[in-house]
Image: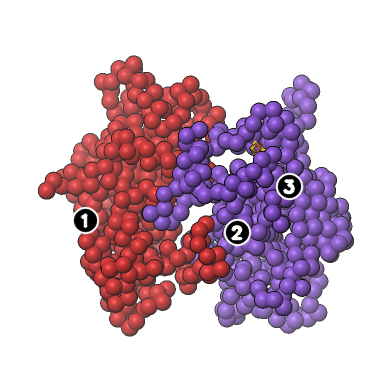
Chain colours: A red, B purple
Amino acid sequence: MAAPLLELENLIVHFKTHRGWVHAVDNVSFTIGKGQTLGLVGESGCGKTTTAFSILQILPYNAHVKGGDVRLKGRSILRDSVKEDGTIDPFNENIRKVRWKEISMIFQGAMNAFNPVYKVGDQIAEAIRVHYPDMSEQEIWKRIEELYDLVGIPKDRIMNYPHEYSGGMKQRAIIAMALALNPSLIIADEPTTALDVITQDRILGEMKRIQEETKTAMLLITHDVSVVAELSDKMAVMYAGQIVEMGTTRQIFKETAHPYTEALLGAFPSIKGDKKKRLKAIPGSPPDLISPPRGCRFHPRCPYARERCLEDEPELIKVGDGHYSRCHYTEELFGAGQGGGA
Amino acid sequence: MTDENVEIRDEVVLQVRDLRKLFEIKRSFKEVLARRPILYVKAVDGISFDIRKGEILGLVGESGCGKTTTGRLVTRLETPTSGHIYFHGVDVAKLQGKALKAFRRHVQMIFQDPYESLNPRFTVMQTVMEPLLIHGIGDTYDEKLEMVIQALEDAELKPAEEYLDRFPHELSGGQRQRVAIARALVLKPQFIVADEPVSMLDVSIRSGVMNLMLDLREKYHLPYIFITHDIAVARYMSDRMAVMYLGKIVEIGESDNVVFNPSHPYTRALITAVPVPDPDHKHGRVQIKGELPSPINLPPGCRFHPRCPYMEKGICDVKEPELVEVAEGHMVACHFARKLYEEGFSPSEGAEEATQA
Ligand SMILES: Nc1ncnc2c1ncn2[C@@H]1O[C@H](COP(=O)(O)OP(=O)(O)OP(=O)(O)O)[C@@H](O)[C@H]1O
Ligand SMILES: Nc1ncnc2c1ncn2[C@@H]1O[C@H](COP(=O)(O)OP(=O)(O)OP(=O)(O)O)[C@@H](O)[C@H]1O
Ligand code: SF4
Ligand SMILES: [Mg+2]
Ligand SMILES: [Mg+2]
């Protein structure tokens, strides 16, 4: 079997602070196949962006890789960059060769990342020039026209300044920029969060079409499970630096196997169904990652927690085909992936 | 809502009639010299609605449609350009000075950002007690403290004593929003405007705050205007819902009537656009065109016509539609409201039909 496009294996990334180590990413493993979309969901501060930054090795200076590996098409892109103390050499050749060209990223809040004094088209052209110095100007501008077609902005807007774009157009241009070098994987960090619903709906539609047309794989990061439901084949649910449940999007929604996932899915009001039904509230708030709770990290907020959960840290347990849950009582509570859950 | 509450609930607390707020756009010195005419943003452009005791009215719409301005007008943090706000039958739209202060005691606003709305140098006790001091309520310190504790417990910060001496940075986002709610409750208001009170909160704490607000309504028959851009949240929270577009209410009615039989093209677009947390849900894409126009240069006729898939030339671009009643208590401002209402709506069908067009 060919190696998957992207593979994270037991990745551990902590931040050094004066208060202590922040356990932002603790033993995270997942794979993304060619053309696949993995949705990574979880609340603010659970480690989603840190996971993404670790893949591209654009971490802040106080980040330390404490273990694990990241492989692209079977080859490690991380091991050689990790220095003795765990910090990263972001200029290592293995990552430099693939960063932006093979793996690109749509940053959280990127809409405002365009430089206001340059025309949008010039900014995209420059990004292409840096990576393909041999490409002719003619080819570059042809590529930009293709990209504008792909993301659905009229070509006569290429030479506008960023402030002449609406929020939705800026986000489309950001997507065009991420696609510019024809990467095999795009990391999209909250790509629609700042947009109103109508614009979000259009951008999601555009992203779906681009997925189908270009077969680009995607790591889709969001706190909004409905965005993942629309765009992803697979899903990983993150809580306090760890993946607590992973499987196909259908499995996560229809055969939910972790109490946190159950709570997260139950916390969204729906436009369908019975309005009188009270939403489930999750008590307490997310933990401080400097001293995450012992045992199961979710135990202080878990309605099913028992004695064992306070001391014993659960492993990811297989509950179905490609479906894993980090809970001691997953089988008892949800059945072994046999349509248990919500 | 049980039957014995019906009488109380029918009591109208607030009647808003033809309320308007224009903001003047500042001209630069150069523009004044060049005699650029004064331009106005029509933030709220003639809206009317009622709120009864114990009722929650959801106010939804895209960014910039005038939701916050409406909230600030009815709590009189802002003075309307024209129109009326009857509070228990008395027009408070033009109140000033002492009378305004007395009115403000009865209406409270809760804001979106629990980080910004609390003074970082105030403890929880100081924050919640401040309104009592401003309005001179409670004779003794002990009496005031009693009220503060009651308000904190109502906001489910229990035991209250544990929170009194904390500063905002020692609280989670959800707890901060509960402090803001306690601060609003301490004056025993008769009416609350909550402006996107859960938008900044994490999903797992959001539902707790929403449930708290529903509980308080049950307990005190407290009416709210609940402002949100999320129509699913509005449906969960409100009895009736008003959809705003560029300063106007385009549809208003019982929440489930609006959600299940939206009869304004804009409401239909909003509902089609809501992403549904279900991988099996196949919904179509919104077919409305273009972007939100500027509230300075409103389109003639129906202000939605440049984006509307149902638009008919000669009608929609000429004449502004009035709100018409399509069913009891369900009002829609569209020339084709009755037809759209009769036809009914399903989000996925709507998309298919529009795709062919
Ligand atoms: N440079 C840093 N130094 C110390 N702690 C950090 C640093 N960057 C992030 N953190 C902490 O690491 C944890 C994970 O942060 P991260 O940005 O990955 O979360 P996230 O899941 O992307 O959250 P959000 O949804 O808010 O974007 C958080 O607790 C955050 O406070
Ligand atoms: N003080 C002001 N001066 C000038 N224009 C204003 C002022 N306050 C609001 N506006 C304008 O009035 C319109 C309505 O604004 P408002 O804040 O009420 O919208 P909103 O529906 O609450 O939007 P959001 O969802 O972004 O909070 C906008 O075009 C806004 O720019
Ligand atoms: S009046 Fe015309 S333009 Fe306005 S919403 Fe109705 S159909 Fe659309
Ligand atoms: Mg993030
Ligand atoms: Mg607002």
Chain to which mark 2 belongs: B
Q: Which mark is residue A9?
A: 1
- Label 3 sits on residue: B324
- Answer above or below: position of A94 versus B201: above
User: Which residue appears at 58% of the width and 75% of the height?
Assistant: B157
User: Which residue appears at 46% of the width and 54% of the height?
Assistant: B276
Amino acid at dot 1: Glu
Q: Secondary structure at mark 1?
A: strand
- Label 2 sits on residue: B256
Is circle 2 on the same chain as circle 3?
A: yes
Residue B26 visible somewhere in the drawing: no
Count residues near mark 2 (Cα–Cα under 10 Å), then give few for <14, some for 14-19, many for 20+.
Answer: some
Amino acid at dot 3: Val
User: Is the Cβ of the residue at disc 2 closer than 8 Å to that at disc 1?
Assistant: no
In the figure, residue A103 lies in which quadrant? top left
Q: Secondary structure at mark 2?
A: helix
Nearer to us: label 2 or label 1: 2
What is the CA distance from the residue labelled 2 to the residue labelled 1? 47 Å
